[in-house]
């Protein structure tokens, strides 16, 4: 029988899914309040995703009724599309650095922002590895800025290695 949690109507199906999947009512309410909102995969539905708990709550956009609750990202692949777009942005940044239209400083700053977006939507990836790759780039950049000099050949080789590692890791 349908019911309510915190004055929010829930379908019987939603209660069944929560119980069957071990999702607590408080996690559902938090997802509705703070989760990333996306259009649903069906008309008049909205999906809320909580990347921390990795659950998606689907509501009726008109009534607000909770229709279902499931583990994982939204089913219409909004998260997957976002990751793909952000990966493409990252590869464009790297290409800009390689062709000389983007400084190492800009590459580091913008790559961190884009990677943050990728890992928000793809929480199973090991963000710390990529942050370590960027940390090496930032260290080289800081060294050259502090000493007001150009990047030497050894540093250029290390930059190329770190960029290749970022590309390989993000492509996987």
Image (cartoon, grey):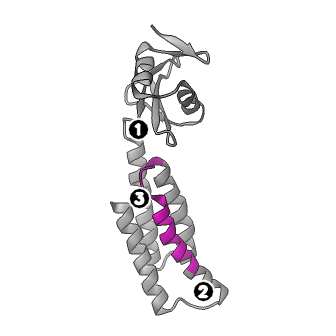
> Do the CB atoms of the residues marked 3 and 1 lie less than 8 Å apart?
no
Circle nearer the N terminus (2, 1)? 1
Residue on which the image places disc 2: 144
Identify the image quadrant of residue 139. Answer: bottom right
Residue occupying image coordinates x 44% and y 56%: 86
* Whether residue 103 is visible: no
Q: Position of residue 115 (x, y in %)?
A: 49, 59
Q: Which residue is mark 3?
A: 87
Left or right of 128, for residue 139 = right
Judging from the image, what secondary structure is the residue with disc 2 in? helix
Magenta span of residues: 121-139
Overall secondary structure of the magenta section: helix
Label 1 sits on residue:
72
Q: Which mark is residue 146?
A: none
Q: Tag 1's secondary structure? A: loop
Question: Whole-percent x and y of residue 162?
Answer: 43, 75
Q: Residue at x 46, y 92 (%)?
A: 153
Name the image quarter holding the C terminus. bottom left
27 in the magenta segment: no
**Sequence-first disc among 3 and 2:** 3
Q: Position of residue 128 (x, y in %)?
A: 49, 62
């Amino acid at each position: 029988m349908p019911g309510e949690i915190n004055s929010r109507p829930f379908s019987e199906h939603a209660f069944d899914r929560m119980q069957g999947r071990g999702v607590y009512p408080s996690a559902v309410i938090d997802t509705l309040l703070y989760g990333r909102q996306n259009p649903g995969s069906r008309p008049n539905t909205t999906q809320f995703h909580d990347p921390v708990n990795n659950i998606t709550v689907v509501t009726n956009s008109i009534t607000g009724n909770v229709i279902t609750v499931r583990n994982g990202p939204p089913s219409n692949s909004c998260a997957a599309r976002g990751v793909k777009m952000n990966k493409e942005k990252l590869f464009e940044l790297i290409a800009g650095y390689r062709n000389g239209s983007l400084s190492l400083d800009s590459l580091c700053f913008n790559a961190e922002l884009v990677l943050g977006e990728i890992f928000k939507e793809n929480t199973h990836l090991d963000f710390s590895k990529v942050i370590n790759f960027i940390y090496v780039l930032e260290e080289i950049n800081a060294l050259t800025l502090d000493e007001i000099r150009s990047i030497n050949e050894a540093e250029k080789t290390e930059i190329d290695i770190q960029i290749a590692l970022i590309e390989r890791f993000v492509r996987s």
